[in-house]
Amino acid sequence: MMSKMKMKNNHFRLAWERNLRTWKIWWKLCPKFFVSCTSYSVFKALSPYVTIWLSAQIINELARSKNPERLFQLVLIQLVSAALLALCTGMLNRWFNCETDSMRRKYDRIWMEKMMKLDYADIDRQYVYELYSQVKQNENWAAWGFYKSTDIFQKMVLATLRIFGGIALSVSLFVLPVPAGSGALTLLNHPLCALLMIVFMLGIAFLSPICANKSDAYWNRYASEARFGNRLFNFYSFLGEDRKREPDLRIYQQQENVCEKYLEQNISFSKASAISKAARGPMGLWMATSRAISVVLTGVVYLFVCLKAWAGAFGVGSVTQYVGAISSLFLGISDLLEQFGTMQANSEFLKIAFEFLDIPNKMYQGSLTTEKRSDRQYEVEFQDVSFQYPGTEIWALRHVSMKFKVGERLAVVGMNGSGKTTFIKLLCRLYDPTEGKILLNGIDIRKYKYEDYINIFSVVFQDFKLMALTLGENVAGSKQYDREAVTLSLKNAGFADRMERMPKGLETYLYKDLEKDGVEISGGEAQKIAIARALYKDAPFIILDEPTAALDPIAEAEIYSKFNEIVGDKTAIYISHRLSSCKFCDEIAVFHNGSVVQQGTHESLVADESGKYYELWNAQAQYYTEEETQTA
């Protein structure tokens, strides 16, 4: 028994700590919410007591002396106070609602900032993605987690103020004596009677939220099912809004054959679901019992107050005061206890949220400043580098050693899964090697400040993304930019003719997400803009991951013909499946099964008939020869 009590206390302490931590985060993000919430709650909780007290005075005056002057004063005071309280409450309510809306807009910053601070190795983990997905699904289900904590705070403040107000107006109920000669009702003057009444009402006040909390416990029980149902609903219900999926949806009737079928099978929120059954069964019964107990409390209060009034302890007007005050008092107690239970239920959802927010940054950020050299004399060397992705024993790279010469054009080739992308991720320090070192000018790159190091790289990733902003802002990655430099970068990337046809030049919006006059661009055009973005950054190293995959042969030839001119004195690393496009590079590194199996010029590699490059080259050359023959 003692161990169970200790466990419950620990659960409550943990729940309190998690919600308190959440409130501290909200306070840092939007302190005005708490000020507006408290101010609004003060008026909302105490305003009814003012009305109750004044109404009692008016009724008592009518029942006793019926002084017209006194009645006029009381009615005037009630009207003025009611008007002022309503006005203040309305203004504070509007302020509270505005701050609540503002808070919700700022809320995403919590997760955005955490995402930006996370090590890329963690962002790339499926476990972290699942954790974040659970947080969002809990919010979509019933606002559990951070949002629920603000609701708990507001209701706890309101309940606490109701308790204080109720005590202030009801204490005299137990102090005022029943006049002598009231017969059996004089027993109400006995201290034990008042004590028993208080204990009885407190017991009911405690029992009601206990039942309500048992009902709320089912939210936790079915959280997993609800998250899964939300995930299915959010994915399949909005596929039709994704323009990129529209062709497939139509050609293969995926809306009818896939989306609707899965939505029909998703019974998470239907009448047949476990949640629905619980709501109609124990969950609903516990909540109904809670409400019934509250009604019993109201009846007991009426009985006790009316008996004392019947005996002559106070006037008939005070009946209104005491019934209203005690009902509100115990409603406050019940609500406060219910919020403690909700806090414990919410604790499990906050546990998931904080598990995500508490993911540590394991990657050492370094302290050395990367030297900004005008001569671009940077040299990168891989020294016996091996790498395993977290959670797997398979080596993605094994014993890779190579050095990049300044101004060199290096092509990285190999079959899918050979380690090319992993090589680039390590070079850009998105991951750290499992074994070995990567050196920049002879110093381990882990010793450099992380942001300084990554700033020496411009990268065109294979799955790059553009934003629904202006053309100039997309290239510069900023609202403020050098127009001449942006224009030159677009020209070098082969986008000059298309830019001239754009209605507003660099000020033309891409896509129609934010601007109805936005311009839709093709995949090849987007790729040219991505190349221009890499050129505009003007970093010493430029990395191109399949940079011409979406370009037509003419545009591709144009890029290659002036590639040296475009790259200038930068060190360029070029990843490609098209071996024919690598001939212009100074050196080619051939990856196979996570290792560099060959390295040299195109001529030397293609001359080695026993090498992997020769095998890949001839496989592609044979394909192109067959294609040309069929076309002819």
Image: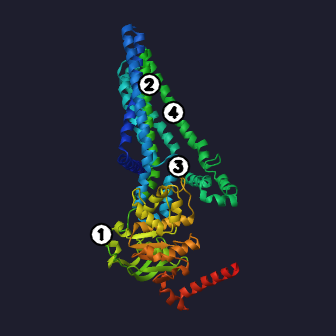
Query: Is 40 situated above or below 269?
Result: above
User: Is 12 rendered above or below residue 47?
Assistant: below
Q: Quadrant of residue 159?
A: top left
Q: Mark 1 or mark 3: name the one nearer the start of the chain.
A: 3
The answer to which of marks 2 and 4 sits earlier in the sequence is 4
- Identify the disc placed on residue 140: 3
* Residue kind at label 3, given as amino acid type: Asn
Select label 1 or label 2 by which is in front.
1
**Quadrant occupied by the C terminus:** bottom right
Given the image, on which type of amino acid does mark 2 rest?
Gly
Q: CA distance from mark 1 to mark 2?
A: 70 Å
Q: Does label 1 or label 2 sit earlier along the sequence?
A: 2
The label on residue 324 is 2
Q: Nearer the viewer, mark 4 or mark 1?
A: 1
Could you classify mark 1 by the number of other residues whose Cα lies within 10 Å: few (under 14), some (14-19), or many (20 or more)? few
Image location of residue 579, percent across then percent down? 55, 81
